[in-house]
Image (spheres, rainbow, N blue to C red):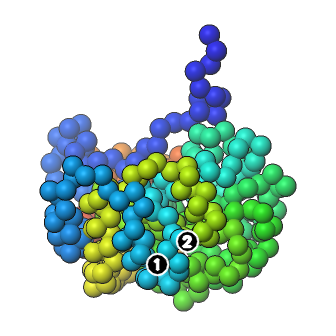
Amino acid sequence: MSHLVSPSIESLLPYEGGKPVEELARELGISDAIKLASNENPLGPSPKALAAARAVLNDVHRYPDANAFKLRERLAAEHGVPMADIIQGNGSNELLDLAVRTFCTSEHHIVFAEPAFVVYRIAALAHGVPFTAVPVRDLTHDLEAMLAAITPRTRLVFVGNPNNPTGTYVSLDALSRFLRAVPPEVIVLIDEAYIEYASAADFPDCLKLRGERERLIVCRTFSKIHGLAGLRVGYGVSTAELVGYMNRVRAPFNVGNLGQVAAIAALDDVEHVRQSHQLNLSERERVSAALTRLGLSVTPSQANFYLVDMKQSGRAIYDALLQKGVIVRPFASLPNSVRVTVGKPVENDRFLKALGEVLS
Ligand SMILES: *Cc1c(COP(=O)(O)O)cnc(C)c1O
């Protein structure tokens, strides 16, 4: 019999998300576990987003608006771009995959960093597109090396900014230069899932860099600072031409009606976003300082998580923290580190206490 799947799909492992609290309860009988593993907003969704979703619950027998008109109209006004330049996604995850499916074949080539968001690799493998994973330098995207990795076959380059799982970023100057230097036929996709958490003065907003190159896709999400991860809403901003091609390929009703209305209300709730940003900023600094006092090193982060170098097996620390009901995230690509989401102050204190016990 012939092979059921291609060698690249054979080589894939299913995406492993952060361990759900319920799973820990089932496996270890721990009922008060906290999850600092999936970069969710510890403040939860905006109450306004919840109210908007509730108000359309009775309509779930209807298909959602396949074009997400009102959401895209709202996003266009928010960012000062034409509606035709915006595509909605079932989380921005779908759009990362959709960009590969729409624009790349096995004749093409993709460039991304390593370690970076694992979905870039999964999408390339799933669709049989060759790729080069360029090692980060000082845990930061090495844009020069990524530029050098571009070949005549390269069709797509992924840049996560801030990067996940490192939390590091590339500056406005460096990214602008990169966007101009990449050959015009290549599509650059900037994944800005965490941009609302960034605080550095030279952090680039790629929606303001659309003039630097034609073939640019900027992806954002409602899963992180907006606290709507469970509703699966993201969006991409590009040109009407690229969006048009992606719309030919995407699934018809890719964002549900609850997600569409909740996302609009979440954008309206600027106070919830502001509070989420502030809490993250102050806790990120406080916890980083506490970890440094424990003798650990923390990679400076622009996101709502931080990478801690445990100076020993990160997997072992992860397992030991699980026993204490604290869920963090180990990475095979960073064997001595764990990634920890910034939680509420009580959650961060619980993590620090558990880690102190594990280390002593
Ligand atoms: C969380 C995340 C996303 C978005 O996830 P969705 O929930 O699908 O919107 C995209 N990129 C990175 C780097 C992420 O960490």
> Pointer 2: residues within 10 angstroms few (<14), some, or many (20+)?
some
Ligand 1: image quarter: bottom left
- 32 left or right of 130? left
Residue 85 circle label: 2
The quarter holding residue 129 reads: top right
**Residue 192 image point, x, y percent:** 52, 70
Along the horizontal axis of the image, is 264 left or right of 195?
Answer: left
Name the residue beneath numbered marker 1.
76
Q: Quadrant of residue 351?
A: bottom left
Q: Is residue 259 visible?
A: yes
Residue farthest to the top?
Answer: 1
Q: Residue at x 69, y 68 (%)?
A: 215
Q: Is mark 1 within 8 Å of ligand 1?
A: no
Q: Mark 2 is on which residue type?
A: Asp
- Position of the N terminus, as image quadrant, is top right
Q: In the rendered structure, are the residues bearing label 2 and label 1 in contact, judged by CB atoms less than 8 Å apart?
A: yes
